Image (cartoon, rainbow, N blue to C red):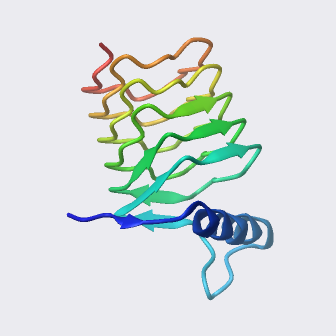
């Protein structure tokens, strides 16, 4: 399946709408960040809220996220290989069937994160809180 390329400017615009949606509540016209079958690269985000975002069957590459909040997000069947998530929060996030090969999660809170059938091969989990994380059939080599 072909992925729709999203520019950094478009992603940032969607993220601003999402953060407004999170603050005000769910307006009838939407606002939640949803990337389905999309591709975006070279993002650099710090202290941003992606809580309850949906990134499904998408590819995020060459990106760095620092102190970002992905709590309750659906990050299903996506490819984040090589990205850096430094001191990020993934409380109750669903990363099932994701490719997180060589991802740096240093210092992140992965409490109750669902990594079922995910690939974390060659990843860095140093300093992470993995309390109650679901690591069923997860590739941790």
In the image: residue 92, left or right of residue 97: right
Residue under the point 63% across and 53% down: 51
Q: Nearer the viewer, residue 70 or 6?
A: 6
Specify the quadrant that holds the C terminus. Answer: top left
Extreme residue toward the left, this view: 1
Residue, x 26% and y 34% (percent of image)? 117
Please state the horizontal and vertical placement of residue 2, each as a whole percent of the image: 25, 65
Image height of 39 relative to 104, above or below: below
Q: Position of residue 95 (x, y in %)?
A: 41, 41
Residue at x-position 48% and y-position 60%:
54
The foreground one among 96 and 39 is 39
Compared to residue 109, the image places residue 106 above or below, namely above
Residue 74 percent location from the top left of the image: 46, 53
- At a point 31% along the width and 49% down the height, the residue shown is 77
Snapshot quadrant of residue 136? top left
Q: Is residue 69 visible?
A: no
């Amino acid at each position: 399946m072909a992925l729709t390329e999203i520019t950094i400017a478009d992603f940032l615009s969607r993220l601003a709408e999402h953060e407004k949606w999170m603050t005000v509540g769910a307006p009838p016209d939407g606002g939640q960040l949803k990337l389905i079958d999309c591709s975006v690269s070279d993002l650099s985000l710090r202290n941003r809220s992606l809580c309850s975002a949906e990134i499904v069957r998408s590819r995020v590459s060459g990106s760095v996220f620092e102190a970002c909040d992905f709590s309750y997000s659906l990050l299903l069947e996506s490819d984040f290989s090589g990205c850096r998530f430094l001191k990020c929060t993934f409380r109750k996030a669903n990363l099932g069937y994701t490719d997180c090969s060589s991802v740096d999660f240093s210092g992140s809170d992965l409490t109750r994160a669902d990594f079922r059938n995910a690939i974390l091969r060659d990843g860095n989990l140093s300093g992470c809180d993995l309390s109650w994380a679901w690591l069923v059939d997860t590739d941790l080599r």
